[in-house]
Every structure is written in C-alpha cells, then in structure tokens.
C-alpha cells in the first residue's frame, strides 16, 4: 500500500534527523535519573587549607588576608560573606570559594567544573535555555511520536503490528501501567 | 547543621557593611529601565527594592507580598539550580529565592555574583518533625549527612517564591 511506503520513508528520514537528539536526551535521561546519587552537571573538588587565625578587623580585611594567604589573584575575587559567627567565605570567579573558620583559619578551597557534554545535553533536555529551544524540543517530541507510530507499520504479516507486534506493544504498555497502579495502590 | 535551616535567623555577632556583603538599606531603580544582567523567568519589574534584612526582621509583615530583593548570591542549589540565596548586610543573614524545579535554572557559577530578584514572601512554620526532615534534605543537597536527632527545635522558613531574577557580575 502507498501509505506504508510513505510511513517507511518518513520513519527512515525522520529517524536520521532525530538520531543526535535521541541519543543526547537518552544520555541526559540516564544522568538526571540518578540525581540523588550524583551531580550530573558539576564536578566539585575540595582541598583543605590552613591559613592561621583570621585578623580581627573588618570583613574586607579578612578577605584580603585570605586572598594573600592563598596567593589568589585579587581580580578573581567576587566578594565575601560571614555565614555564621565562625565561618567566613570568599567567593571567586567560576564558582570557586574559600570557606575558612575565623578562629583557626582552617577550611576548604572548593572548585567547580562543569561535566563536559553532560552539562550541555542536560541543559537541552531539561530546557534550561527556554525561548526558541522550547519549540525545537516540542518538534522533537512530536517527531518521536511520529517515529513510534510509523515504526509500528514497518512490517506486514506475522511480524507486523497485526501479528506478534501487538504483543510487544502490549508488553511495553503493561510495564508503565503496572507502575502507575503501584503508585496509586 | 541547624544553621542551614535558619535562613532567616540573626547572628548576634558584629557585622560589616563592606562593599560586597549584602544589600543597601534603600534601593531604587529607574522606572522603565531594564535591569542589567542575565534574566531568568519573568525578570524584575518592581522598581523599589526591599532589603533582605528588613524582610528577615519582620517576615510576617511581608508574608504574601511581592517584593524586589537584591544581594550577593551566597549559595545556589547544586543539583537542580532551583534556588539561590542572597546575602543581607548582617552576618548569616540570607534569603532564599526558590522556584519550581525547571522553571528557572541558576548556575552554580552565580555564587558571588549580584542578584536582583522578584517574588512573593513566603513564611512556613515547621513542626519539629518537618524541621528534621528539612534539615536532612538540606544536608543531602550539600552532600553532607545529618543526624536528625541533633535538630531539637522547630523552625520557620522565610523565602521568596520567585517569579523572576536578574544576575550580573557586580552590583
């Protein structure tokens, strides 16, 4: 039938177009699915520091002390904050931060780097970009629906949707339905 | 650990009104002039800013009110980017700007930058049990572990349910 030929062509060519985003979204899906176990966007590194007791002056004096002791570039300093009676923090560019105990001068220098590839695909998948990307993602979602529907028509006969295909489709439906029932039970 | 809960608590220590910590007592922007920086959500439309300290000193007085708040970003949600905290002028004074997951995503690199935010002040009184759960959740977000038994008093959470924000390098 003519419609099957058309569906096959649509499935093939749309499938080619969707390859990159399908893999990207699947990769991101795996990454963000385990958000409670790890940070899929950032990698944090910490090193212990011991600067000695901070001066008793103003917070600006303390910031200068931390910067000098850590041999930091003053231009990399964004600001400071006394988070508690004992904790002083100096913020640096790129999310880097020194947290120091005022009395002892002991603390940590924390750095952050984005996870290559994952950070980008997560931004796309979670639509952090908003704006036009929202519509691109909508089109991709529609494309996936078309791929799913046309995919069911690829084969005729015993291996098609009218044959064993319907059991596989049913199995794929039963799994989420079972979890939804479990969710409400 | 309890300090993570006491977003609105006042630390009774000497504070410094240095150039980088906190927000100015009175802040007025020019009406109609867009706020410079990277805009998130609906951005900021209000012209007059309310200092973080003022809101935290009387949270019930601001409950349900839409306000514009400004301050240095001290913390950002590291996993979902769904909140950040802005510094007041006093030590330990911070106000959390919270949005629904995915509504806006703030980068961890925003720490130390300057935020101008708009939202509705929310005040939630927690029971001791809720306080413990919240404390554990907050600790987990920071990759730390907390024994809930160490939390012995219920607390109050003051936050800004955000509608929009602008983040820029400096004030």
Image: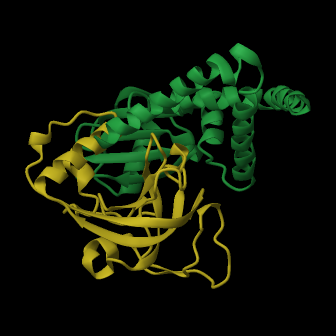
Q: Is residue A95 left or right of residue B50?
A: right
Residue at 69% over, 42% down: A141
* One can see residue A51 in this view: no
- Residue B5, above or below A149: below
Residue at 36% over, 38% down: A181
* One can see residue B130 in this view: yes
Tint of chain A = green
Q: Is residue A104 left or right of residue B164?
A: left
- Residue B162, above or below A63: below
Q: Quadrant of the C terminus of chain A?
A: top left
State the image coordinates of residue A163 (x, y, percent, origin top left): 66, 18
State the image coordinates of residue A132 (x, y, percent, origin top left): 75, 54
State the image coordinates of residue A131 (x, y, percent, origin top left): 71, 56
Image coloring type: by chain
Q: Is residue B64 left or right of residue A86?
A: right
In-front residue for pair B99/A86: B99
Tint of chain B = yellow
How many numbered markers are drawn? Answer: 0
In-front residue for pair B70/A67: B70
In-front residue for pair B65/B1: B65
Residue at 33% over, 69% down: B122
> Looking at this rendering, what residue extends furthest in the top direction?
A158
């Amino acid at each position: 039938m003519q419609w099957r030929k058309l569906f096959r062509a649509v499935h093939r060519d749309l499938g080619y177009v969707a390859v990159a985003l399908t893999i990207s979204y699947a990769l991101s899906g795996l990454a963000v699915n385990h958000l409670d176990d790890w940070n899929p966007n950032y990698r944090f590194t910490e090193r212990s520091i011991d600067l000695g007791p901070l001066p008793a002056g103003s917070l600006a004096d303390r910031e200068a002390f931390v910067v000098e002791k850590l041999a930091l570039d003053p231009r990399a300093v964004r600001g400071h904050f006394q988070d508690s009676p004992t904790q002083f923090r100096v913020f640096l560019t790129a999310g880097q931060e020194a947290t120091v105990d005022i009395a002892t001068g002991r603390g940590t220098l924390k750095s952050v780097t984005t996870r290559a590839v994952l950070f980008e695909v997560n931004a796309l998948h979670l639509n952090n970009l908003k704006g036009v990307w929202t519509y691109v993602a909508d089109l991709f979602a529609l494309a996936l629906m078309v791929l799913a529907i046309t995919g069911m028509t690829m084969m005729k006969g015993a291996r098609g949707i009218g044959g064993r295909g319907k059991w596989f489709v049913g199995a794929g439906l039963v799994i989420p339905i079972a979890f939804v029932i479990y969710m409400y039970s | 650990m309890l300090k993570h809960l006491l977003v609105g608590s006042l630390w009774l220590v000497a504070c410094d009104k240095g150039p980088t910590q906190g927000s100015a007592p009175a802040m007025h922007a020019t009406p109609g002039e867009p706020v410079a920086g990277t805009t998130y959500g609906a951005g900021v439309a209000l012209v007059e800013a309310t200092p973080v300290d003022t809101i935290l000193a009387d949270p019930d007085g601001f409950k349900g009110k839409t306000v514009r708040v400004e301050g240095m970003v001290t913390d950002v949600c590291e996993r979902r980017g769904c909140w950040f905290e802005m510094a007041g002028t006093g030590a330990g004074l911070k106000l959390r700007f919270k949005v629904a997951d995915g509504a806006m995503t703030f980068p961890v690199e925003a720490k130390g930058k300057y935020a101008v935010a708009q939202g509705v002040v929310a005040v939630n009184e927690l029971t001791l049990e809720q306080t413990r759960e919240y404390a554990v959740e907050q600790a987990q977000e920071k990759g730390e572990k907390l024994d809930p038994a160490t939390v012995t008093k219920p607390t109050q959470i003051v936050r800004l349910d955000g509608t929009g924000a602008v983040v820029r390098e400096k004030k």
